[in-house]
Image (cartoon, rainbow, N blue to C red):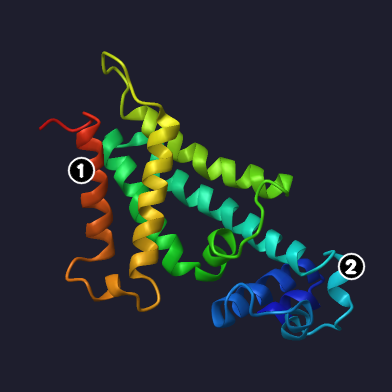
Amino acid sequence: MARSSYHHGNLRQALVEATVRLIEENGPQGFTLAEAARLAGVSAAAPYRHFTGREDLLEEVARQGFEEFAARLGAAFDDGRPRPLTAFLRMGQEYLGFAAERRGFYIAMFESGISITGNSGLQQASERARGVLVRGAESLFVNRPGPQPPPGMIADHIWALSHGVVELFGRGKPGSRSPISAADMLESGALIYLRGLGVIPD
């Protein structure tokens, strides 16, 4: 696929796709710029037309991952339909789906050690993804009287919970042998957390 993309003139994207494949096979540190070039079917010097180095290419993979991640979370939330709680929990399941289906991107985003704040485009894409979770958290308290917890805190807690479930069940770790599925563990954990915040009546 990467080689075909290059021959259509999209060298930058061909290198991104090649890097995703290498990350899936060897991990975020298990590739070089030369290997990405070779897989894309170009010379070792060609990547430098678009990227300053390996980290720059890795950051672009992560940026594209966050862009897709944000879009998928937004589609899952669907403006809170049919109910805010249902839509909010649906985003958690989409988080698991993205991690499983777009593993190379997910690893680049969360496990590569890159600095998100050091790249403005990457930071903006990451903030868009978090923004969807924040809007979902805000929707849980619409028309609810009394003090409300910060939506950003709720978004971050659910993000952390989701990431923890992915890590627990990923790549043959102990959780992968659990009688409870990753989806059920995430939903039950989210429900317990939200019940503690008063979103769900006792």
In the displayed structure, would residue 192 be above or below residue 152?
below
Where residue 72 appears, as percent x and y from the top left, is: 47, 51
> Which of 179/71 is in front?
179
Disc 1, SS: helix
Tell me the residue at 23%/30% (across/down): 199
Disc 2, SS: helix
Determine which of the numbered discs, if any, sits on residue 49 in the image: 2
- Mark whose residue sits in front, 1 or 2: 1
Q: Amino acid at mark 1?
A: Ile
Whether residue 155 can be seen here = yes
> Which of 55/131 is in front?
55
Determine which of the numbered discs, if any, sits on residue 151 in the image: none
User: Is residue 82 left or right of 46 when viewed as pictured?
Assistant: left
Tell me the residue at 47%/39% (across/down): 132
Instruction: Tell me if mark 1 has few (under 14), some (14-19) or many (20+) residues whose alpha carbon lies within 10 angstroms of its own.
Output: few
User: Is residue 140 left or right of 52 when viewed as pictured?
Assistant: left
Tell me the residue at 35%/35% (across/down): 80
Residue at the extreme left: 202
Where residue 71 appears, as percent x and y from the top left, is: 52, 48
Determine which of the numbered discs, if any, sits on residue 192 in the image: 1
- State which tag comes first along the sequence, 1 or 2: 2
| C-alpha gap between disc 1 and disc 2 | 50 Å
Q: Amino acid at mark 2?
A: Arg
Quadrant position of the C terminus in the picture: top left
Quadrant position of the N terminus in the picture: bottom right
Instruction: Tell me if mark 2 has few (under 14), some (14-19) or many (20+) residues whose alpha carbon lies within 10 angstroms of its own.
Output: few
Residue 22 falls in which quadrant of the image?
A: bottom right
In the displayed structure, would residue 178 be above or below residue 146?
below
Where residue 121 appears, as percent x and y from the top left, is: 71, 47
User: Is residue 95 left or right of 10 when viewed as pictured?
Assistant: left
Where residue 155 appears, as percent x and y from the top left, is: 41, 39
In the displayed structure, would residue 171 be above or below residue 78?
below
